[in-house]
Structures are given as structure tokens and as C-alpha cells.
Amino acid sequence: MLFSSPVFLFVFLPVVLCLYFLIGKKLRNYFLFLSSLVFFAWGGVSYSILLILSIFFNYLIGRGIGKNPGSRASSKYLGFGVFLNLIFLGIFKYANFVVENLNGILEVLSYKPFGDPGIILPVGISFYTFQAMSYLIDVYRKEAEVQKNPLNLGLYIALFPQLIAGPIVRYHDIARQIQRRTVDSAGFAYGIRRFVIGLAKKVLLGNTMGSIADLAFNSPADQLSTPLAWLGLVSYALHIYFDFSGYSDMAIGLGRMFGFTFLENFNYPYISRSVKEFWRRWHISLSTWFRDYLYVPLGGNRKGSGRTYLNLIIVFFITGLWHGAAWNFVLWGFLHGFFLIAERAGDGRFPGKLWRPLQHIYTTFVVLMAWVLFRADSPGSAWNYYGALFGNGALQNNFAVYSKVLNFEFLLFFIIGLLSATGIILKVTGLLEAKISVMKERYFAVTEIYRAFQAIFLVGIFILCSVYLITNTYNPFIYYRF
Amino acid sequence: MKRRFVFSDYLLTILFILVISSAEIQQWFKILPEMPNQENRALNPMPGFNPARLDPFPRLFEAYYNDHFAFRNQFMKLYADMNFKVYNKCPYPDQVLIGHNQNLFMVPKELDTYQRTTLFTNNELDRIRSEFSYRKKYFENKGIDYYVAVCPIKYSIYPEYLPWYVQVRDTISRTDQFLDVISGLGIEVIDLRKVLLAAKDSASRELFMATDNHWNEIGAFVAYQNIAARIARKIPGVRVLQANDYTIRPKRRNGGNLAHIINMHEEMQDVQYTFTLRKSVKISSITPCPYKVPDNFEEINFFKGYYMQDNNQNLPRIMIVHDSFGKFIHAYFRDSFSRSVFIWDKWQYKLNEPIVDAEKPDVYISMTLESLLPGLANNCEFH
């Protein structure tokens, strides 16, 4: 089920919220786990069996590790657990990719190819498998207690706000909240605010930008003009940001409504002045996961430059593969890894010593070029797209381009998108909020009137999003497929 | 420190809960008046729950829920209004193009016809040549005068109402290709594009409806006059009615089919003309349909047959196979011919031999909208 679907907004959410607060506190985790299973099953009932299986074997392995954390036996349990999770992910996410590539080699060698495995990618598998591994590693490292209640572990792995598209919540960050949490009126209202803002980012900004990006990236090479290619690329950069950060906002907001506090997943990545900074601001939960559970165990930057570069290449190769079983994702990961190494090799001089606007231009350019690989269907179509970007484009645009771009709606959302993604709107609203909080103690009633109007505005935005959702059939989440 | 009662938090929470519950409240208690559904499609039904086949259920249920969402029609209308009035854009740009002076144009099939972005392949042209060669011989053997008429799309007649970025992309059009093949076979071709373009400059009234992709009663009358004059050259007895044979009255009406698609048919007005014959001209009567109607097509659309009341045997008999554009010409032809038969065969443009054999017309006209010529090429029977 998608957050931005009428069934979720007008059936699932009110029913779950209502029952959650009506039942006793002791039953709330069980109810939330059950609701999460229903939420997950909505995307494919058969897939729920995999999720339950994952919860079950991670629970057993976790108990094995927890008997004597840090011992050799627990190391074996951990190794087995990580292996099982990776095999699980490998079969359901990468089997088709592996067979496809093997068949390519077999074809060259004139051998009979393997049959198509025909495995359908289960929804959210990359997210919940990484969360399960986080649990095992945290218990092994004694950063968290073993979870003795399988339903509570199930709740951690399957908690519906972050189940299908993150943020990837590390077990030690949330273990206590599973046992004990409170919801107050301020937290609940904050959750609503974040949820509505996330919904608006996804539905109003993300989808609008996405339709232009689709237009550009789906155009045949001979019909893609250079201006359209650039507009499509910038629109895609905005689309993926609003789509994914909007989803994270909704997840964080929903979490708060149920008393959970998830860590932030985005921090204005497009204002970064280096690729390194970009990865501190983009999909923070994934980069933190890789840092803690892969880069650091590989040795991080503690074993000399050569090894650090190798570790970075490994991490970004896997980051690319995590996003999708295709070579263009691998190339996307390598491109980021390459520039991270280049920045590190420059010993802080590059791009740090450049004039600040040049640092922004450099980072934005690298990120945009990498998005071409991320969005294109194959390395070949990415190559054609690069061609169109740098002058080898069609001379004319087709009608659909003009009809979708030359209107007030697109221009409005495009400008709001640019101002919002670059943090300018945050700065303006931040100044206003600062004034309001100063006034709050003295003029409480005045600030409350402002906040009341803000509440009405947010509810209006929610209704506007619902209007778009009901009338627009275009509504896919990019990260839903990972 | 004692926490303050924060009114805005409670207000937001109450409003949010109310809004997310509102669809179910409306579903059960019908607080707001219902609005009619404007969509021209069957809504998804409630799927049956089969525990043995659970996987498709959520998808089918969502399709059902979205189609029956309590505020669906209100939201659709709000979306259309917002797009049209606030964003100044078409809510469904894949369907309708908004031109100057609020002239609407149909996008599917018609835009690419105008822009000449798709042409007939040689293979398609060969098939058309073969089929029409057969038809020509068929009518020659029966002694029936045969005409092929092509109706223009609105784009062809009023390109000045189009946005600047809608431009012709090629020197030859699919319509030109088709007419070249037909005239090459020696069949009488009536290119109504030229007729209406010529009439546009001299006519004081528009020839197409502003909010519809069809011509209006004036445009249809211009087409009728040209066709009837062409027939009269071969059959001098044919009477070509003139504008002064009618009393013509304009009447305001709600927007046409394109205004309907964008959910603005009540806000957008159009002009309809009523043509009332003066008394000196004979009045005709309608006959019931004796022929097999195509599946899933209404008889009232498929067949229209008229006799002149005094059954004037001096006037010839005519049969016209047409599409929706042909509906507008019935009134003029039925008062010029002793027997007029109009067939709208669900855009198949068949020869309809059983009807020809039964009706024994003196004149047979195949009349097709230029954007539907590929349909004619693909649906013909290939004798």
C-alpha cells in the first residue's frame, strides 16, 4: 500500500489510528505489528510470507547471538545470519540480473543459456533485510539487547511507516521506543505536519517534476532536444528528491503519530559543496548503515590511502547494486565513488579551495550527471541522453513537451521545487519561525492565531493532494521498487 | 514547567482526523449532495473475496475504491476548474488542446494528422488501392455514382487558433496520400478541406464549434452544398438547397464533446444553429432499420433512412456511409433526394453490400474524417 493512495489516506490510516488509541497500551505493539502486516500484504499477499520468514529466522539467530554476545559461537551465528539475509536478498533481488549476465557470457561461448528465473522483486525487501541485519549486528556488538518477544522484533522489521521505503532504522536507535513510548498532543500534531508536508512534496512537487522527467527520458533519442534533456534532468533531480524525501517525511510523521522518533533521512542535499557532503545529506539512513556496518568493518580510513579508496569503491559498488540490479546503477555508484576518492586524494584542496559558487556548480554537475545513469533504462540509453545534453539533440520538441511545460502549474511547482530543494524556503520560514518563537512567550494568543491559520493551510494542502491523487493516475514511488 | 494548552495542535489534529474520516462519513450519511459522474467509462466493480486467490484482491479493491470514492466527482470537477481557471491549462492535455479564443481541439488522432508526423506506409497504400479498386468496379457494375469524401479536422480549417508550438512537420499529409491513391484510381474525390477553407474566408459565421471537434450546422451545410453540386453535375435533377431555403437561427448551448472531456461543459458555451426549411420545400419521413446493427452499437446511430413525403420519383436515391461528422448533414440531403440512407457502421467504413443491394441507390458516398483514415485503411474488407 502506498501512503499516497486514497485507500491508505481515507481507510487504513483513520481505522488504524482510531483503534490504536482505543485499545490498551499493552496491546498496541501487537496491533501495530498486525496492521503492518496488512499494510505490507496489500502490496502482494504472497510477499508477506517472505517477510514473516525473515522475521522468524532473524529472531532465532538473534536469540543465538544473544546467548553469549561477542563469543565465537555468536560470531558464527552472526555470520550465518548475515549470510542468510544476503542469500535471501540475492535470490529475490539479484537472481534475474545474475542469470541475465551469465547468459550473455554463455551466448558468447556458444553454450546453452539458463532459463529465465522469472522472480518478481518483493516490495521493500532491500529495506527490511538491511534492518534485520542491523538488529543482528547491534545485538552482536552489544549495542542493543536481544529481543525476546518475536512480535516486538516483527514490529521493528515490519513497522509500516518505514517498511517499504525507509528510512532504514537501525535497531539500536529504536529498541527502547519499541518497549516504551508516549504520544502527546504536540508530538501527534508534529507528526501530522510532517506527514502532510511529505505528502505535498510527493504528490504536488514530485509527481509534477516526474512527468517532465519521464517525458524527457522516455523520448526516443532522435526526438530529444538539448533544452528538453536539461529540463528533464533537472526535473528528475527534483523529482527523485521530493519523491523520496517526501516519503521519508511521511514515514517520520506517521512514526510520531504512534510515538516513534525516526532519524532524519535528508538534509537539503542539493546545497552540498562536495560529493562527500552530498552523501552526508542524501539518504542519510542508508549511508549511515553502510558506514557503520560495511565501511568501518572493512577498515574505513584507518589502513592507509590505498585501502581507504578500495573500501570506498566497494561501498559504492554495493550502494549502486542496492538501488537496483542493473549495470547503470553500478555505474552510478562507481561515479559517486570516483569523485569521493578524487576529493579525498585532493587532500581537501578540491573542491574545498574553490570559490564557493564553483563548489556548488561542481557538486550539482556531478550529481546531475550521475542521475542520468540512475534514471536511464540502460547504459546505452544513458549514453544517448548524454549526447542530447551536450548538443547532439533533436531540433524540435514534440507537442507534449510544450503542453506540459508551458503552463502556470509547472512553472509554479518548478520554482517552488527549486527554492525548496535549495533551502531558500527553509531560510525564509526559519526566520519567520524564529520571530514567532521569540514572540511566543509574550504574545501567546497572537502566535496561536498564526499557528491556527497554519493548521488550516496544512489541511487545505492535504485536500489539494487528495484532489490530485484522485484525478491523477500518475503516482508511482521511485523507491518503492528497491 | 506547566505545559500550556496549545489550541493550534488540537485544531490541526481535529481537522486532520475529520478530513481523513470524511470519505467514509460521506459514504454513509451523504452529507454533501452527490454530483453526476462525467466519465464515459464503466466504473470498476467491487471484487469478490476469494481466500484462494488473495494476490489480485488489493489491486482490484483499490481500483473499485478509487472509482467509488465518496468525493470523486467533486474532486474531478475541482481539479478541472483549478487547471482551467487558475493554472490556465488543460486538465487532460493528452485529450484536449486549448487554443486561442477558447477554441478546443481534440488531441488523439487529430494532432498527429495535422502535424503530419505519421504517414501511410507503402504497404497500407497498396491495401487501400486494392480495396478501392474493387469498390470502383463494384459500383460501375451496378451503375451507381461513387464518391469518396474526406471531412477536415478542425486543425486543418482553423490553424490560426492553435498555439504557436503546434506546427505542420511535413510537406505531405496522410490525407494527401489517401486522396492521391483514390483519384489515381479514377474515383470521384471530394476534398472537403479545400471546400471549407474556401468557405471560411467568405462565411460570416464559424464553420466548426468552438468547444467540440465537429463542424457545426453551417460547416456541414457548406459541405452538403459542395457535394450536392458535384452530384448535380452528373444528375441534373438533383436540387441543391441554398441558405435562403432555410430560416437559420443561432442558439446558445452548453459546451460540446471536448468541453465535456475537460469537465467544463456547463461553463463553456457554444453556438448551435437551427435550420428550418421554408414551406415551399417538401418534408421527409423516417423509416425503421431493417438491417443488422454492428455489435455494441446503437441502432439509432447505425441507420437513418428517409423518404420524401410525396415520394418524388424524379429525384435520385442516395446512400452515405459516414462517421460522427455525417450526422450533421442528414437534414440537408434528406430534402434533396427521394430516398436518403445514412449508415454509421461503427467506424468500419465498410462497403455494406447487403444494404446497397436492398436500397439500390443512384449515388453512394463514402465520407470519412481525415484523422480516421487509418481506421478506414485497416478496417476495409480487402476484397
Image (cartoon, coloured by chain):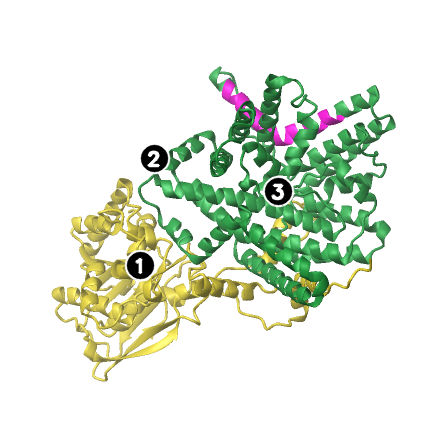
Question: What is the x, y in percent for residue B39?
Answer: 49, 62
Provide the secondary structure element on which disc 3 rests: loop
User: Which amino acid type corresponds to the residue marked 3 in the rendered image?
Assistant: Phe
The residue that appears at 55% across and 22% down in the rendered structure is A345
Q: Looking at the rendered structure, which numbered label has been put on residue B162?
A: 1
Reply above or below: A41 against B319: above
* Colour of chain A in the image: green
Badge 1 density bin: few <14, some 14–19, many ≥20, Cα 10 Å: some
Question: What is the x, y in percent for residue B96?
Answer: 39, 59
Disc 2 and disc 1 on one polypeptide chain: no
User: Which amino acid type corresponds to the residue marked 1 in the rendered image?
Assistant: Leu
Q: Dividing the image into 4 quarters, which one contains the N terminus of chain B?
A: bottom right
Question: What is the x, y in percent for residue A68?
Answer: 86, 25
Badge 3 density bin: few <14, some 14–19, many ≥20, Cα 10 Å: many
Chain holding disc 2? A
Identify the chain drawn in yellow.
B
Q: Which of A249 and A120 is in front in this view?
A: A249
Residue A464: name its quadrant: bottom right
The residue that appears at 53% across and 69% down in the rendered structure is B36
Reply above or below: B285 against A300: below
Residue bounds of the magenta highlight:
A81-105
Q: Looking at the rendered structure, which numbered label has been put on residue A392?
A: 2
Of labels 3 and 2, earlier in sequence is 3
Provide the secondary structure element on which disc 2 rests: loop
Q: Mark 3 points at which residue?
A: A266
Q: Is residue A476 visible?
A: no
Chain holding disc 1? B
Q: Which of B241 and A219 is in front in this view?
A: A219
Q: Nearer the viewer, residue B253 or A257?
A: A257
